[in-house]
Amino acid sequence: MNFLTDEMEGNLTRWLRFLGYNTLYAKDYESIYGSPVADDDLIEQCFIEHRILITRDREMVNRFKKKYKKIIQENPDIYLKFDINPSLTPCILLNSTKFAENMSAIFKKFNIRLNYDSKIARCSKCNSNIEIIEDKKKFREKIPDSVYQNIDEFWVCTNKDCNKIYWIGGHFKEIFNRLAEIKKYI
Ligand SMILES: [Zn+2]
């Protein structure tokens, strides 16, 4: 399952990437379409790239559904490319202002995983894959001193323009708390 998130969903975007989902954000398309990207262009991208649309814009969801209905009548095989249960439409309208409620709504509809796995996690900043760092010395200048001294396992974003470094440290306590909070709504 891949996702496309509307402009207000920066936080959800980072979390879905972190959980291992290929997720592009409305702003990621500004280099193609200019700013802001029109709803119809984002909907079009969902069909080109087979991404599930995540938005809180009801009108956008209505337009998406109308287009989806027409497309599947012409080409029923498109279901398979979205990698979802065929009884579902590959879009979700979010209703809450609370992060945990919205994540649980996405879970309830698409059964997303709510556990962190470093083997499949993606860069929360740019959506690229991350890979384990074999020798942390090579990244010495990019890692804070206390972290470098206490932690041995690091990952780096494979996008050379990003190269963000990841590690499982004290900040994961907050991450696990948030995952537990999401599960409370399920
Ligand atoms: Zn990155």
Image (cartoon, helix red, strand yellow):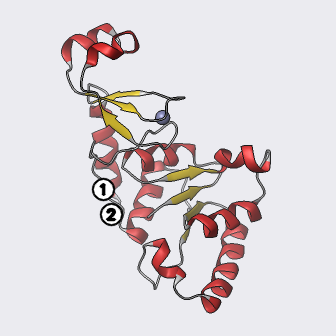
Please rate how many residues cluster around mark 2, counting C-alpha atoms within 10 Å: few if below 14, some from 14 to 19, many from 20.
few
Identify the residue at image location x=33%, y=38%: 175
> Which quadrant is home to the C terminus?
bottom left
Report if residue 182 is visible in the image: yes
Front-lying residue, 144 or 164: 164
Label 1 neighbourhood size at 10 Å, few (<14), some (14-19), many (20+)? some
Does the residue tagged 2 have its C-beta within 8 Å of any atom of ligand 1? no
**What element does badge 2 sit on?**
loop
Tag 1 secondary structure? helix
Marks 2 and 1 close (CB-CB < 8 Å) = yes
The picture places residue 86, in percent across and down from the top left corner, at 45, 84
Q: Give percent across and percent down for residue 47.
A: 62, 70
The residue to which callout 2 is attached is 186
Q: Position of residue 135 (x, y in %)?
A: 25, 20
Q: Position of residue 125 (x, y in %)?
A: 50, 36
Q: At 73% from the left edge and 45% from the top edge, which residue is drawn?
A: 30
| 162 vs 30: above or below | above
What residue is at 52 percent from the left and 43 percent from the top? 11
Tell me the number on the disc at residue 183: 1
Please tell me whether residue 33 is drawn above or below residue 67 in the rendered image.
Answer: above
How much space separates mark 2 and mark 1, taking CA atoms?
5 Å
Q: Quadrant of residue 1?
A: bottom left
